[in-house]
Every structure is written in structure tokens, then in C-alpha cells.
Amino acid sequence: MLEKIIKGCRKGQRESQKELYKMFYGYGMSITLRYADSRDQAAEILNDAFMKIFTNIAQYDPSRPFKPWLRRIIINTAINAFHSNKTIPEKQRLEESQNGMYRQEQITSGISYKELIAMVQQLSPAYRTVFNLYVIEGFKHREIADMLGIAVGTSKSNLAKAKQNLQAIIEKNLV
Amino acid sequence: MNEIGKNNDPLENFFREKLEDHNIAYDERDWEKLEQRLDAAGTASQPWIKWAAAAAILLASLLGYFIYENYSAINRINDQLANEKSSVTEEQSSQELPKSKSEEQNQSKAKKGTQPEHSLATDQPVNTSSSNPIPGDKSTELLAANIEAVNNWDCVSCGVSSDPQQISLALMRSTSPISSENANHQPTPNAGQKGLASQPRRWAAGAGASPHIRLGLVVGPDLSTAGSLSNFERPGYKLGVKADVFLGPRFAISTGIMHSNVRYTAGSSEYDFSSRYIADGIAVQETFAECAILEIPLTFRYNVKDFSQSGLFVSGGVSSYIMLNEHYQFTYEDRYNANGESVREWSTRSGRAHIFSNARISAGYEQALSNHLGVQIQPYLNIPLSGVGAGKVELYSVGMLFSFNYKLR
């Protein structure tokens, strides 16, 4: 099924392109929502990624799994969006927790997905991107530094601050 | 994955479990926005197709026009010869005996004399001394008129002998599909000269051609690759202008400027990363490039064969490349990805110039449409002499150039 859709996309068939988009829309949006400031921006990043996918579909190797290839393009597109939005003033940062240490017992699984996304979107773009790449995508700090054009130390520092801020947000929501 | 120990972080684990691979409900409005972008991009995605189609239509139209004009001229000459044949037949029937004797005398004299062949290089006229017309003899006057017309007719490799009978046969066979039965009838001088004079003079350079310049508008598809003549990517295109400066009958210096859209794939050994930081310690497996380049060729052209309305040529020389825009897509090893690789993109507008970076060889066929206009088809091959672009790749290119030429006085 997927193979047939990809073949249609290679030929530029609009029906196949729409099928592919619908098939991976939910998966793609779950990625871009974590990198974007808002849902609209997340949809825009997703569409940017799919434009690249449809344009470069001829370079996809059918012998390899499609989902990781698509995932990587979406992440790269999200990083490009981060680079292009660097001049936008960062969101007001949350006050760091006075403790500096998170309280493990305070974390609850009752928080919904939407709430978690909203928490992540409250982070500044730099913290949010490093947090996503390290915690969710599983990249190493050295790789994150290469992708974002920052120092390894900066990547580690941003991750620590992202986690502190998220802890503070969670605690604020629990109050 | 991440460093050992970090996986035990409860905050990280919590967010990872909650946020990883979550499915969001589909929204048709997002697709509609993407579809608009696809529609807008579709018309501009492959400009070379439009250019190639336009060039093909233009070439077909011009060739069709030329063929139509050619057949019209042939039909006119056919009509004239048919009319003259009937009038000559009437005259011959009234002058049987004396006419045949004078013809025999002229033929014997023509055979005895030394007759040089008609040659382009020397442009030697056919010897008419043996066929001086006998005053009052209309048939010999006709033959002399035809001979004179041949002398004024630029023709390469006509192979026409000095024999008046042969000359007349050659005239008729070359200008109309008249059968050999009619070859014995002589056309009237006025009609013959008029028919030959209506032929446009030779476009191709040749004997008597003065130095001149031909300007041309060129377009055509281009296939490029790095490292060797294999593994080509999707075609790009070339579009530009050229000038051929003819210094002699067959020799010209050509130059021009062409905007090229070049696509190629380079292997790990064909792209030089030493000049720049791309990926820290991670090997690049393959590079896909799409570049906009200004090509400035400088070649020497030689016409190997000239016909009345066309010519074959070869050319060789060098080209210089100016890099306008370079876009690269690097595929490199990434063991943390399921497919074992990652893709990164990088672009630059360096404007770097590579003087005489490629050798260029080509051959071509040029067809005249009128005294000043012509069309040309020219396959070419560019071979690298040095590396070009950010990655200093050795770029090979093959393609076909279609051009519309204008000859300046």
C-alpha cells in the first residue's frame, strides 16, 4: 500500500500525495508540535517538510524504511525553522525553580498530551529544540551542537535549563 | 542513544513516553494549504521542460517553414522548365539538320579541350571556350547561357563537368525531379538563370565568404555528473547567447555566455570537505548538488563540410564556470537512525570563478533559413580540467544545444 502510494508520489500524482500526507499527518504533527510555538506554526513546519518530501521523493531508497526518512526530514525542517526564527525575541523565561532540583514525587501521569505540549511550547525556542532533540529524538549533545551550530556546552546547559523550566511549569500547574 | 544514566531521569522518561509517537487528528485545511503550494511549485519545478518544448516547437516550425519554401521554389522551377520545354520542342522541330550538326561540333570541341573541375576552394569557372555559342544558333546559345549560370552558382562538390550536355543534365536533376528523358531539352537562358538566381546564396562560409559574425540564442538540456561519465542525475538546462566570429572561409572563434542549471551526485571521494566544517567526524556517503552556473565558452570552430544551405562543423576549446548558487544535500552515516543515515542541506552563493576549468568539444549542423537567419543543433561534451564549486568536484557534462542564429553583415 505504502509502496504504491510512494510510486504515485514519484510520478507527481496529487491523489497519492494526499494519501501520503493523510497517512503521516498525525505522526508528523506530533513531532512539529514539540518544536513550534503554536499549532499553526507546527502545521506550517509540517507542510514545509512535506514539500521537501514530495520534491525529493525520487531520492528515497525504497529498500529502506520510509518512516525514519520522513522523520528525519521533519526534524531537519523544524531545526531550519528554529534557525530562521532566531531573531524573534524569545518568550519570557520562567523563573527557575528555587530548589534547582526537581521533586520526583510531584510528577504525575494525569497530565494530558495537550497540556504537555503546551508546557513544552512555553519554553524558549533554544531550550525547547535541545530538549526535543535530546530527550525525544535521542541525539547526543555533540550531534545537537552540529545541527544547531552551537557549542556542546551550550547544548548541555540548554537541556538543563529546559528541564528546570519544565519542572517549574509542572509545579505551577499542580498548585 | 543518549549517554548511559540519563535514561533513568524520571522527567525525561515522562516526557518521552507521553510525547513520543502521539497521533494528532487530521485537519483537511492543512492539506489545502499544502496543495496550493504544490500547485504553485508544479509549474516552476522543471523549467527545462518548458524551455526544451519551446525550443523543439521553434525548431520544428523553422524547419517546416524552410521545407515549405524549398518545395515552393522547386515547384516554381518545375513549372518554368515545363513551359520552356514545350517551347524548345517546337523550335527544335523546325531546325532539325543544321541544328544537330552544330551541336556535334560543339560537343567535339568541348571534349577535346582541357576542362578543370568545379571546385569550392579555387572556385574555378567551367571552361566555356569550347562551347562558344554560334551566332544565330539558339540551342548553343541556350547551352552557353546555362554554363554561365553554373559559373555564377555557388555549389560545393557539385561535381559538374564542363560538358554542356552534362551541365544541363546536372541543372535539371538538381533543381527538379524531371526525368532523364527531359534532360535533352535545354531550358531557356532566362528561365534557367532566373530559377538559379532565385536560390538564396550560400549561408555557410566558403569561398568568397567575407569575415563576419553570427549571433545566436542557445538553449538545450544538460546532463552532469561528478568524477566520471556515469550515474547522471535528472537533466538540467543551458540558456544563453553566443557569437561566432568567422575569420576565414571555414574557421571561426566562438564565445558566449550561458546560464546553466546543473544537477549531479558525488560520492564520498568526489567531494572535497577539507575546506569547511560540515559534520564533526561523521563521514559523508553521498552529496547531491543543484547549482546555478554561468558558463563562458571559448572555442575554435571549423566547418568540415559546406553545402548550399547548410554545413557540418566541429569545435573545441575551453569553458570557464562562475558559480552563482550552490545547493548541497549531504547524506552521511548516522547509526542512531533506523536507516543508518541522516541528511543535511547547505547552500552558498559564493560567486567563485573557475577560469578554463573545463575542456569543451562539440560537433554540429547548421541550416540556413535565409541570407541572415539559420538554426543549429550542436551536441557537446564538457570534460573537467580542474575542480569547481565548494566541493571542488570534477564536473562532466553532456548535452545538446539548439540555437537560432543571425548573420551580421
Image: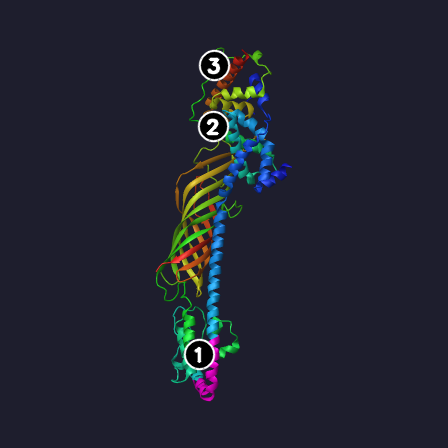
Amino acid marked by disc 3? Glu
SS label for mark 2: helix
Query: Does residue A13 show up magenta in the picture?
Result: no
Residue extending farthest to the bottom is B97
Q: Residue B343: x and y, percent?
A: 52, 34
Say whether disc 2 or disc 3 marks the residue closer to the N-terminus. 2
Instruction: For residue B276, say whether it is visible.
Output: yes
Amino acid marked by disc 2? Phe
Residue on which disc 2 sits: A82
Tell me the subunit letter for badge 3: A
* Quarter occupied by the C terminus of chain B: bottom left
Q: Nearer the viewer, residue B253 or A168?
A: A168
What span is in magenta?
B82-105
Asked if marks 2 and 1 fall on the same chain, the answer is no
Q: Residues at badges 2 and 3 in contact (C-beta under 8 Å)?
A: no
Residue on which disc 3 sits: A96
Residue on which disc 1 sits: B164
Asked if marks 3 and 1 fall on the same chain, the answer is no
Q: Residue B305: x and y, percent?
A: 44, 63
Instruction: For residue B246, say whether it is visible.
Output: no
Asked if marks 2 and 3 fall on the same chain, the answer is yes
SS label for mark 1: helix
The alpha-carbon separation of the residues under discs 3 and 1 comes to 110 Å
Main SS class of the magenta portion in the image: helix
The alpha-carbon separation of the residues under discs 2 and 1 comes to 88 Å
